[in-house]
Image: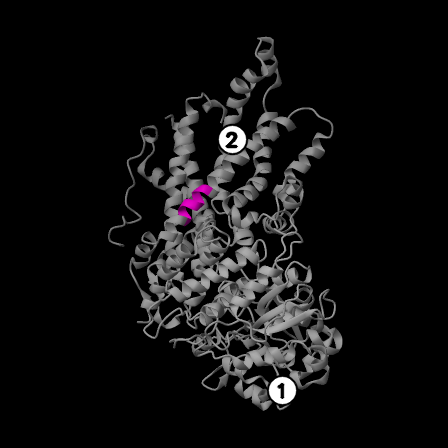
Amino acid sequence: MATITAPSGAPGPPAPASAAHLTAAEVARNKKRNRIRRLPLLPALIFTVVVTQVPFLLTIWYSLQSWNLLHPTTKHFAGLDNYKTIFTDPLFRTALLNTLILTLAPVLLSMLFGLCIALLLDRKVLGRGFLRTLVVSPFLVMPAAAALVWKFTLLDTQFGIVNWVLSPFGVHHVDWINSYPKATIITVLTWQWTPFMVLILLAGLQSQPGDVLEAARVDGANSWQIFRFMTLPHLRQYMELGIVLGSIYLVQAFDAIFMITSGGPGQKTTNIPYYLYEVAFRSFDIGRASAMGVVVVVLTILIATFALRTISGLFSDEGMEGRL
Amino acid sequence: MSGRSASRSRSRYLIGASVAAAAVVLSACGGSSGGGQSTSANQTITVAVVNNPQMSDIQKLTADGFEKSHPNIHVKYVTLDENTLRDQVTKDVAAGGGQFDVVMIGPYEVPTWAQNKWIVDLSSDASKDTAYDVNDLIKPIRDSLSVKGKLYAVPFYGESSFLMYRKDLLQAKGITMPAKPTWDQVAQIAGQLNDPATGMAGICLRGKTGWGENLAPLDTVVNTFGGQWYDMDWNAHLTDPAFKDAVNFYVNLVKTDGEKGAGNFSFNECANAMQQNKAAMWYDATVGASVIDAPGSPIAGKLGYAPAPVKDTANAGWLWSWALSIEGASKHQAAAWTYMSWATSKQYIDYAGSKLGWAAVPPGSRYSTYSNPNYQKAAASFAKPTLDEINSVNVKQPGTKPQPYVGVQYVGIPEFEDLGTRVSQEITSAIAGQQSVDSALNKAQGYAETVGKTYQ
């Protein structure tokens, strides 16, 4: 490799036209000074590389091994076998589909509810600060604790509040969690993430200039028109942010699934993070788990890039450029 | 696209990429968690236990019963539910993490773990200590925790499985429980006792996912129905008529006369349901009697016991023990043995009996418990059935056909941790009505075949 790298003393690219009056010696001195100036950044750079990239490289290395912790003597290099297993594994495809459903549904639902609640909270009502605190509280509860409250206090078949509240309407001892597993997880995640959307959208609403709205009203626009043609376009960048951040977090949803359904019944709520956990800590197949990690990263980067491009494209023709 | 928006989307791309990389970092770092080590005379040992009632008791009694007389040993408990305990402990021993000094395991783990030297041979420690009296440990249990005559774990309690039922409720309906009931008789009685109006289920059976959860009772049913996981050539037989009949029987029994929401029920949940008058019978671990028939339980004294129900075999009970063993990577092995030899001693059983009442002491571990007059009096109704059931178990061939592995309610191979969990997920799904038993077993057969091939 060393033979390919240019020697450090070699002349760089030709100096730009504006610097043409500098002598070669001056250019070299400037370069050296710049290099010295950047030197203090080096520790931070090395730290960043070590912290972010080394584990990833290790994961790639592990993914090429046949390595099961339960069979310590059989560890060997396996090439791409682990990847072959993953792509022929029907459970992995199920998990992928579940991840998609369990991410999109809560993000969109919490965005919808968040928008409604934010619009209400934006009005001047008595005790607005108190209401806001109440609305935000689900987001502040620890996810594991929230999952337990949902599992036992609310949805329990025998003693759950939901069954008790619905009992006058002829609903008896419904096993919500096992009868409607996906809906249960989506509900819990939506409940937890709606406040997040409210906070972001509320910030958006409160940054909307009042004089513009007043002018619209003077011009004869009704409430719906103001919302549709003034507020909503103004909010779109905030909604975009909420959807992107929400998706990034919810793709990794684990707590609620682990605590409430353990991925079940069957594989109904097994998403990729939970499936990865099972492969790593039930079958202790470190090689396959690492390979799954790598596949997920590649997919995430692809989808994230694609989604962000699409969203940016959507908004660039709305004349939003100047505001960002 | 303007230059500005291009740079914006690029920076977003980078954010997306680095978030994704962070996810991998997290998944890769799962294995690294070191335990703090102290080299001074004062030692802290970390003990991982499962969250069953007897383990909660010992945690309460450790400060006065052990730490006072051993001031330089401090015991730190990590209490986890069965599935999580297995995940955590197996990860720790397999990676040589040394996060725990003493771990609670059972007959399933002992053979493999001993072979991999993940746990320490306790034979010499145990036999040197005459006060410990290793021969007092109940033999089938001791054998299940030994490999080639060497003891690798000491039983905190031992158990088989039997049927617990409310004598008063059966009497009120004029039903008598046969001395050795068959599953068909039990199903019939469950149907008579099931009362949706009062929320009283005829029988409580485990439905929760986990090979040590719903598969434990289910496998004893499979055995006595004449089914088996593998034949002597490691061919999987999960779709055989006998296996199918057994699973259909179990799933239908839970669905028609079992507890509501069975998919979430395991040992602790069923114990609760019994105490809250929500279930009339309960087929589960014999240790359940020490929970629901102990002082303080609202139904204490109202219970009768029958052997594990059968069909084609003479006995059907399982064999299990929650036992303590020392992790090979532990740096406090001497202190760990000191603690273990207290926790599984006659003295601890005496101490727990005097503090908590004799019916609640850890059962099934020592013969001396069963010859103790205090225990005989307090546990009169369930002491003998427990011991009989433990002695009747044949771990080498619990069913009607020979099997190439050891184990009654599990398949004694390392892969079963994953295989069993997957199959039990399908079973839970069938119990919850999400799929038919046939479809559950077809999938299960596929998983089992893959594992079986590696042994052929």
Along the line of sight, the residue nearer the viewer: B320 or A5: B320
Q: Do circles 2 and 1 both sit on a common chain?
A: no
Q: Position of residue A172 (x, y in %)?
A: 62, 46
Locate residue B228: give its quadrant. bottom left
* Rendered position, A276 above or below B372: above
The Cα–Cα distance between marks 2 and 1, rounded to whole angstroms, is 68 Å
Tag 1, which chain? B
| Mark 1 crowdedness (10 Å alpha carbons): few <14, some 14-19, many ≥20 | some
Quadrant in which the N terminus of chain A is drawn: bottom left
Locate residue B437: give its quadrant. bottom left
- Tag nearer the camera, 2 or 1: 1
**Amino acid at dot 2:** Met
Q: Position of residue B269 (x, y in %)?
A: 61, 60
For this view, does A78 lie left or right of residue B125? left
Q: Position of residue B242 (x, y in %)?
A: 40, 66
Q: Main secondary structure of the magenta part?
A: helix
Numbered circle sitting on residue B132: 1
Is A216 magenta? The answer is: no
**Amino acid at dot 1:** Tyr
Q: Which residues are magenta?
A: A95-101
Label 2: state its secondary structure.
Answer: helix
Numbered circle sitting on residue A45: none
Residue underneath mark 2: A239
Q: Position of residue B434 (x, y in %)?
A: 47, 50
Is A96 magenta? The answer is: yes
Tag 2, which chain? A
Residue B102 shows in this picture: no
Q: How many marks?
A: 2
* Rendered position, B177 above or below B249: below
